[in-house]
């Protein structure tokens, strides 16, 4: 099945009319997210979509042959409309997704299990720092697993123009003022540089982490980790690798960091 066919199948089966459109097959977030996953993982890989909502993006990947799990509390206001939660749960089940309804307990997944953890349009809704959540999610990923995060851009052109004309770049106040219960909208929006903080962890030997284009070389202790920040002021794919040569596994530690333009 092609990506375009998977998207069209989700549109056909999705139980909420008007939520998805046929134009998504060639553009937009759904296409871009799935296309990015296909660049880094093979079908059959295990993916956790944290904050998956009604599983619209998750289902596309499931139909492409990935083993997808979803996690969400389904407590947005539109989820509470009679019948909507049941429709979302039924769609996830029919699509073959292992959906878990969020509760107050810990994350109900096995550690070191997933090839990728996804969070799409999630971090901006958190009232607290995402640090603890991200650390908990990383424990669910395999040592070579990937963390795939997308967030709205707090300084995109539309928002910059609104501020120049004296308008707010935030959610309209009326919607915020009359919102029933705890606010579920955006709390803190991000720009590209906010998310460029890397933690490199070694499960065995001492390693190093180098990106030539950014003049980064960091030492990682055996069985430990190193955390560092840098300004990602250039877009593009950048190769990272281990500069050590004393062990065969050093040459196997390499990959690609992708920085997208604002």
Image (cartoon, helix red, strand yellow):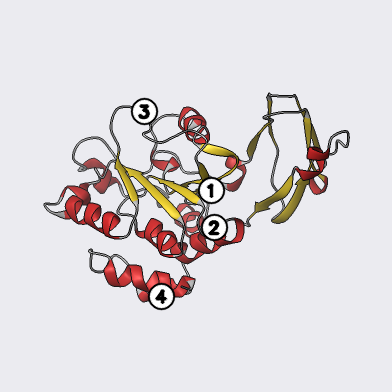
Q: Among all residues in the image, which is located at the extreme right?
A: 246
Q: CA distance from mark 1 to mark 3?
A: 21 Å
Instruction: Tell me the residue that label 1 is attached to.
Output: 148
Could you tell me which secondary element the residue under label 3 belongs to?
loop
Q: Which of the 4 quarters of the picture holds residue 242?
A: top right
Return the residue at label 3: 106
Secondary structure beneath dot 1 equals strand
User: With 50 as the anchor, is 144 left or right in this view?
Assistant: right
Task: Tell me which residue sits at (49%, 58%) in the image.
Answer: 161
Residue at the extreme left: 82
Mark sitting earlier along the chain (1/3): 3
Query: Which of marks 1 and 4 precedes in the sequence?
Result: 4
The residue that disc 2 covers is: 37
Quadrant the C terminus occupies: bottom right
Dot 3, crowdedness within 10 Å: few (<14), some or many (≥20)?
A: few
At label 1, counting other C-alpha atoms closer than 10 Å, the crowd grade (few under 14, some 14-19, many 20 or more) is some
Q: For residue 23, which numbered disc appears in the image?
A: 4
Quarter of the image for residue 230 reads top right
Residue 120, percent from left and from top: 44, 50
- Labels 2 and 4: the sequence-earlier one: 4
- In the image, taking residue 46 as reference, residue 14 lies left or right, namely left
Name the residue rendered at 71%, 56% in the picture: 237
Q: Residue at x 35, y 59 (%)?
A: 56
Nearer to us: label 4 or label 1: 1
> Can residue 49 be spotted in the picture?
yes
- Closer to the eye: label 3 or 4: 3
């Amino acid at each position: 099945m092609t990506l375009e066919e998977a998207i069209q199948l989700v549109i056909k089966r999705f139980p909420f009319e008007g939520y998805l459109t046929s134009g998504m097959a060639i553009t937009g977030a759904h296409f871009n997210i799935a296309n990015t996953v296909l660049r880094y993982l093979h079908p059959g890989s295990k993916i956790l979509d944290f904050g998956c909502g009604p599983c619209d993006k998750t289902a596309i990947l499931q139909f492409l042959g990935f083993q997808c799990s979803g996690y969400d509390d389904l407590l947005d206001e539109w989820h509470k409309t009679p019948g909507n939660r049941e429709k979302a749960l039924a769609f996830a089940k029919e699509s073959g997704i292992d959906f878990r309804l969020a509760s107050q307990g810990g994350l109900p997944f096995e550690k070191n299990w997933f090839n990728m953890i996804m969070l799409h349009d999630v971090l901006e809704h958190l009232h607290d720092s995402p640090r603890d959540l991200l650390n908990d999610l990383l424990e669910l990923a395999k040592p070579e697993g990937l963390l795939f995060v997308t967030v709205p851009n707090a300084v995109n052109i539309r928002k910059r123009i609104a501020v120049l004309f004296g308008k707010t770049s935030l959610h309209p106040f009326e919607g915020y003022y009359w919102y029933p219960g705890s606010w579920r909208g955006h709390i803190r929006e991000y720009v590209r540089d906010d998310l460029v903080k890397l933690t490199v962890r070694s499960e065995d030997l001492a390693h190093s982490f180098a990106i030539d284009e950014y003049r980064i070389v960091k030492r990682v202790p055996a069985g430990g980790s190193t955390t560092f920040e840098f300004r990602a002021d250039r877009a593009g794919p950048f190769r990272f690798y281990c500069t050590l040569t004393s062990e065969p596994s050093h040459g196997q530690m390499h990959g690609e960091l992708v920085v997208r333009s604002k």
